[in-house]
Amino acid sequence: MIGRLIVRRASTDDASIILYKQGAEIKRLTPGRSGRFDFMLDYDSDYIISFEKPNYVSKKISINSRIPSTAQKRAFTIDFEVELEPQTDQSALKVYNNPVAKILFETRRNDFGFDVDYSASFQRDVAAEERKIAEEAKKKAADEEKARIAAEAAKRRQEEEARKKAAEQARIAEQERQRKEAEARALAEARVKEEARKKAEEEARKEAERIRIAEEARKKAEEEARRAEQERVRQEAEQRRLAEEARRKAEEEARLAEQERVRKEAEQRRLAEEARRKAEEQARIAEQERQRKEAESRALAEARAREEARQKAEEEARKEAERNRLATEARRKAEEEARLAEQERVRKEAEQRRLAEEARLKAEEEARIAEQERQRKEAEARALAEGRAREEARQKAEEEARQEAEHNRLATEARRKAEEEARQAEKERIRQEAEQRRLAEEARRMAEEEARLAELEKQRSEAEAMALAEAKAREEARKRAEEERLLAQQEQQRLAEEVARRRAEELRQEEERIQRETERIREQEERIRQQILKEQQQKQEELVRQANERKLQTMAQQSANKGNPIPVENLKEMYDTEVTVEKFELNKIILTRTVTNREGVITFYTRVEHDNGSVYHFKNGEFITAWQYTNETK
């Protein structure tokens, strides 16, 4: 599209050309001295080009770039000129509020051109407006008042936009709060699981530490016994050497003394061995009893904690479901009562409009009635578009929240799986280390035992036959003690492994239960969300249906009036003041209706008060907040 801007008796230096697409500004430029300009326009769109200059009357050109499906899309050229005139009277501004010309596709010419009918109508409007300017010169004070009212209306529109923006920000903040609460719940659950895992690992570490301490104590006792045995053997050798010297002096006396000594030592060793075995048996029984009690107490505590957590989760889920059910019932009841009240209001308003329209006989009102009908349709279209936009934004936010929750759930499952694998690996590493230590310890003991047996064998070979018998008896007693100790150690290890296995199984079952409970709660929340979405969609469909019914009623009234159009919202004669308040008392309901007439635009506000104390607010039949109702009906 190309064109030229002409400014009468001035230059185009400070002029502006603004391009709007679908009502939104997309480009702004300042033409050069020649006034030439050009734009590239898309198909299937509505454009407005505004030509503006300070102290000059602004003009607008409307362009509809839609073409029939049968026409071929190609590069069309639109060329025109626009001339701006000085602004001599502020009242002339309203003449050019609407586009001075419309450009659209002409099927007959297969090209874009000016809408001749619109141009002729606009010229007639301009001529009529120029006549009015001359007549309204003496009404300057009234015009100034109208300008003030228009400024107040603009201010109210700005306040309404600010209110809508604040409401949108509050809704976004509420969504953010809900998202953070969901994240906090997920983090709390993760912390609980992490604490449980750490507690289990700490108990396993303590168990391994206890086994290590017991093993060190056993090793220390064996080392002391070995040293005592070596000392005893050394002393016996020394005694045998002294006895051998004495034997040469008094062989008989020494032999008798040696026999008595050997007998006493054998008796002492026998008593000491019996006492040691008895003490070891008592210690083993006491240790087994302690381990059994500890395992039972831990199992009881863990089972009690799991049961309390399960009961608490079920109670919270039940309370949450009950709250949702009560809230849903209350909302449905309020919506049903409000719908009935709105139907009654619409019926009465339709009757009032019919009576008011029957009294209207002047033909000059037809233009104003048509304009009001157009404004109402545009308002309904904007309202439906805004409702669809809000619904799409809400659905998009919910989808993003759901994807975020799904992402967090997958991340939590992956982390839990990694932690479980690490825990199993750590458990396997501890077991292997314990096994390696046990094998090393057995090898060391076997080596020490072989060395000690070799030493004893050497000593026995040097001793007499009686000493050999005593050594053999001591060796048999030691072997029995070693076998008993090994059996006790194996039993302790078996019990420890059994306790660890049961604990791991209980942890696995608890994690599976928590996962199932979490999945159940998530499915329940999803069902509630789907139900709310379905109810909201049904409500939107009901509003659209009611709007269509009102439109059909209006068309029927127009047909019944023999061609005289009857507007839907034209109640200006009945509500000629800016604010009118009406109050109705129905069965268990008090309706307070506030009707505003601002610049010829009629708006209905309804306050529905039930005998149970609940209060609801509506604007033109749509639900609004109490804050919005109070601020807009001031």
Image: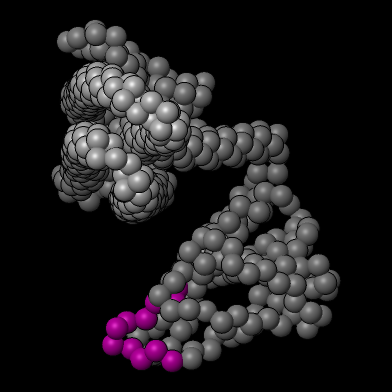
Query: Which portion, as a residue range, is magenta?
Result: 64-74
Residue drawn at point x = 42 percent, y = 28 percent: 249
* Magenta highlight on residue 524: no
* Magenta highlight on residue 70: yes
Tell me if 522 is positioned left or right of 629 in this view.
left
Choose between 223 and 63: the one closer to the eye: 223
* Image quadrant in which the N terminus is located: bottom right
In x, y percent, where is residue 576?
45, 26
Residue drawn at point x = 67 percent, y = 62 percent: 58
Choose between 222 and 452: the one closer to the eye: 452
In x, y percent, where is residue 226?
39, 36
In x, y percent, where is residue 209?
40, 34
The extreme front residue here reads 249
In x, y percent, where is residue 12?
79, 73
Residue drawn at point x = 22 percent, y = 37 percent: 469
| Majority secondary structure of magenta residues | loop
Choose between 30 and 93: the one closer to the eye: 30
Choose between 413 and 164: the one closer to the eye: 413
Tell me if 103 is positioned left or right of 390 in this view.
right
Tally of marks: 0
Tell me if 403 is positioned left or right of 286 in this view.
right
Residue 377's place in the image compared with 305, above or below, is below
Work out whether residue 257 can be spotted.
Answer: yes
Which colour style is shown? one colour
Work out whether residue 489 can be spotted.
Answer: no
Residue drawn at point x = 31 percent, y = 48 percent: 461
Residue 399's place in the image compared with 524, above or below, is below
